[in-house]
Image (cartoon, rainbow, N blue to C red):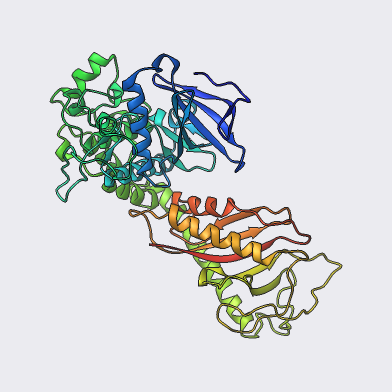
Amino acid sequence: MPLSPGQKVHKYEVVRQLGEGGMGIVYLARDVQLGRPVALKLLHPRKLGSPDAERRLAAEAMAMAQLRNPHIVMIHDMLSVESAQCLVLEYVDGETLRSRLRRKRLALAEVLEIGAAIAKAIAAAHRQGIVHRDLKPENVMIARDGNVYVADFGLAAIVERPDDQGSSQISSFPMTPAASITAPDALALRSHTPRGTPAYMAPEQWRTDAPTWAIDVWALGVILYEMLAGVSPFGGSPDVIQELVCSRSPAPPLTAANGRVPESIAGLVVECLAKDPAMRPAAKTVARRLGNAHLTRGVPVRWRRPLLVGLACTIAAAMVVFFRAQLMASGGSDSEGATSWPPDPPMTKLDVIIDPILRPSPSTIMTARTLPPSASSSPKPMPRVGPTSTGSSAPPSALPDGFDRVAADRALKAGSDAAQVQCNDPDGPHGKVSVAVRFAPEGLVAASVVNAPFTNTPVGRCIERSFRRYTVPRYSGDPVTVSTTVQLR
């Protein structure tokens, strides 16, 4: 059933149609209770009443409910709308990878980042025994903040998780004991019929072999080839594509279409497009190799010197700031004749615990900084508000008028907890992530990851989004910047 703008579906108000495909239609809607945008996915009108289509939509919901990864679109709920099923999904404000490829030629660094994110998403699905089976640029979303999401698990298949040798077999067990979907619905995911998009189907898909995780790696190889070369390795009608893919001839070399691609990346694409599925690398291996190449290895030599120079400058600046702060904290001065207070006229510094109610953890002990005062004003000594994280003395000062310390700490703790749950990546970097959280007088909260190797990475952006979801009451005065940490395991 088509939906109209303004129409209410349970607690969701329809805004507009986002798109439609052969199976369903997707609408942008607003959660009137929580005030957040969502995407509503319903079966296409011509598929209403089809038991197979209904089972597949229910199976898609079941598959997505098992997955929790920063690069996979999240499912919020499953509803019934006039006896038709409706999926409530996370809304990604951005564009599909297909749209971006049509709009411009991607730089190598962008290809590596997008490819690594896709590989991490399907690796997470494989760990849960789920094969996507329809990976293609149309099912990859790129948000405005740069994060990459894999969507549409409508053709997903359940398989056993890859063993140490990399093989996988069809599973005979349900995905979860708590699943509300009946066994026949779950079996819809185990169909051996050839399903998928021809240009991205692996040889074993055309042969209707039992699905394995290697199917997704093949599709990822085709996507990488397309992003790097600007063309698909297998073009033509479905019959022509089937003949090319199922022949014994290897896939066309990437270097023939783009000679500037580094050998390490071209070799990885060749491995992903191996006709023998047993010869393809695991998705987590592809993610790791693309991630390494994105840092330094595989990047053209002409890019390495600016990269290393920038890294060296960042480290040097961080060391200067660190030793300057240590000198100030010990009561010294970085110039002869300067007084210990104010140590630096352009900035007022205050170390404070902003949670008098909750027991603070190390991640909630914060260093607050206000913006420079006006030229006509000077900082006034105020009583000490709280101890620093190290227990050392700090120059006296005060927070801006009306700044709600309790609300700020709650927002900080909620953001840290959300980041630990949503941004942990088993194949990504681990450890403590330093985050600068900025509270604005308008009540807005911004965040910026400040330490490598998390800066300007998908994990780093996920952490920043986790903090930006929260707000604090409005107050008067200058913005407050707080330093905190998130522990990723």
Residue most toward the right? 376
Q: Which residue is drawn at 40% across and 39% down?
A: 111
Residue 333 coordinates in the image, percent (x, y) = 66, 82
- Residue 75 lies, with reference to residue 443, above or below; the image says above
x 53%, y 27%: residue:
27
Given residues 221 and 147, the one toward you in this image is: 147
Residue 228 seen in the current view? no
In the image: residue 140, left or right of residue 400:
left
Number of numbered discs visible in the structure rendering = 0
Answer with the quarter of the image where residue 479 lies: bottom right
Instruction: List x then y, in percent, for residue 412.
Output: 58, 61
Picture quadrant of residue 32: top right
Q: Quadrant of residue 207?
A: top left
39 up-or-down from 423: above or below:
above
In this view of the protein, can residue 87 be seen by the observer? yes
Query: Is 276 located above or below residue 429 in the figure?
Result: above
User: Split into 4 quadrants, where in the image is the C terminus?
Assistant: bottom left
The answer to which of 364 and 9 lies nearer the viewer is 9
Picture coordinates of residue 432 (x, y %)?
A: 44, 65
Residue 430 image point, x, y percent: 38, 61
Q: Seen in the image, is 75 located left or right of residue 50?
A: right
Relative side of 223 to 106, left or right = left
